[in-house]
Amino acid sequence: MLSEQSYYRATAGATAYPPLSGRQEADICIIGGGFAGLATAAALMERGVQNVVLLEAQQIGHGASGRNGGFVFGGFSLGERGLLDTVGAVEGKKLYQMTLDAVERIRGRISRFGIDCDARHAGIYLANWFDDDRILEQQQRFMREALGVEWKRVGRDELYDKLRSRRYFGALYEENAFHFHPLKYAQGLAWALAGGGVRVHEGSRVAALQREGAHWCVTTAGGEVLAKEVVVCCGGYIEKLYPKLAGAILPIATYVMVTEPLGERLHDAMRTAAAIYDTRFAFDYYRPLADSRILWGGRISIRDRSPGDVARLLYGDLLKVYPQLAGVGVDYAWSGMMSYGRHKMPQLGRLPEGLWYGMGFGGHGVGPTTLAGDVLAAALTGDRRLLDRFSPWGLPSTGGPAGLLAAQLTYWYYELRDWLRQ
């Protein structure tokens, strides 16, 4: 029987932070209890900043932060080549290194705060979908020469020993990457924040956000926060909170399913604890879970789908790679909204009226959201140097419904190109 909730929600347990009640004062109010909001609060706490309030409309990790594939690795949605094309080799390398530093920051917080999030430090494979060795050769050389990063080349036969699929033609292995249960991580980080003095409130959707003199008034159904500074970290669920910000992101859906426990049958397909994605634009991403299930994700759309529709689509994708798994059951399937800027880079900054924001992390957000927290916390405490590195991208309008249609057509175009190439 297909569950109505995600695997993450079913296995993470519930959190219990009270809704905002009455009037509070804060130096900094953070709106959004996903990775970006939590990371900003954590970075402020680590800098010794007190008097911080974090408001979450639903539950901690409700949005993309608690629904994603759980990959923790370097890079941005824009891609490495696009990054360097925009800002040049020197600055691009610095930005990419910031994402690698964020991976280690996450690893360090898991250890420091004792967060039980099923972290598996087994690396990630970029598997080649196409019978063309030049794809991996060029990527490996680019990573080494342009970014100073060494990804290990894995031959076709060696990869087949780990992934029992003839669909792939070798891979690159990123050893320092890992994967985890993202919702457990979000909940564990929230617990650490609450223990460190941050006032965390769930069920506290912001109904109004207004400037009142030198302060902001943040209003929910049950109370209000009068804050010197406000940081908006709402991503694909920003809705109508602040139109100037909402108009700069596209809420794009992606899909994930989780199989039934496979037991020894898992080894008919996967003989590695690493996570996998492939070289197509419209790639699959998947990983083995500790209880012998496979979590499988992929596809991009402008609309949510029902769990049944998601399961049918992704089950077909699974069998294209591992036909020997025909007949396995799917216990969980879900979709969720990611936030993309038109340029596919994180949107970090401060509006002229004084409102801070961190959003637009797209489908590559675990590392960059943590990076964003460090960048925003530094800026909030007086050091804008890191924040200025993101000024080339800004907040261009995504075009509303027309932008969504354009995004879907672009995805279909690249999906067709992948199909023709194979």
Image (cartoon, rainbow, N blue to C red):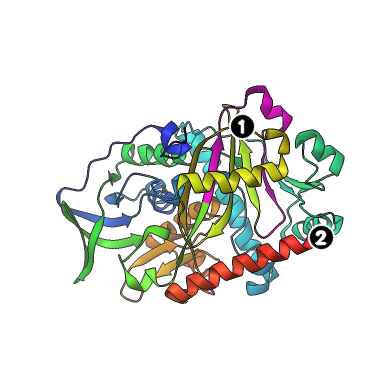
Q: Label 1: how many residues lie within 10 Å, few (<14), some (14-19) or many (20+)?
A: few
Q: Is residue 268 magenta?
A: yes
Q: Name above or below for residue 282 compared with residue 332.
A: below
- The foreground one among 419 and 208 is 419
Q: What residue sits 76% from the left and 35% below the top?
A: 162
Q: What residue sits 71% from the left and 45% below the top?
A: 320
What numbered label is drawn on residue 328? 1
**What secondary structure is marked by label 2?**
helix
What numbered label is drawn on residue 247? none
Give the magenta part as a residue range: 255-281
Q: How many marks?
A: 2
Q: Nearer the viewer, mark 1 or mark 2?
A: 1
Q: Disc 2 residue type?
A: Gln
Q: Label 2: how many residues lie within 10 Å, few (<14), some (14-19) or many (20+)?
A: few
In this rendering, position of residue 306 left or right of residue 194: right
Residue 399 seen from this side: yes
**What secondary structure is marked by label 1?**
loop
Q: Name above or below for residue 375 compared with residue 242.
A: above
Q: What residue sits 29% from the left and 51% below the top?
A: 57
In this rendering, position of residue 81 left or right of residue 114: right
Residue 234 seen from this side: no
Q: Disc 1 residue type?
A: Val
Residue 133 placed where, x, y %?
A: 86, 55
- Estimate the spatial distance between the alpha carbons at disc 1 and disc 2, rounded to whole Å: 37 Å
- The foreground one among 112 and 397 is 397
Residue 54 placed where, x, y %?
A: 30, 50
What numbered label is drawn on residue 138? 2
Q: Is residue 108 magenta?
A: no
- The foreground one among 325 and 249 is 325
Q: Are circles 1 and 2 on residues that touch, CB within 8 Å?
A: no
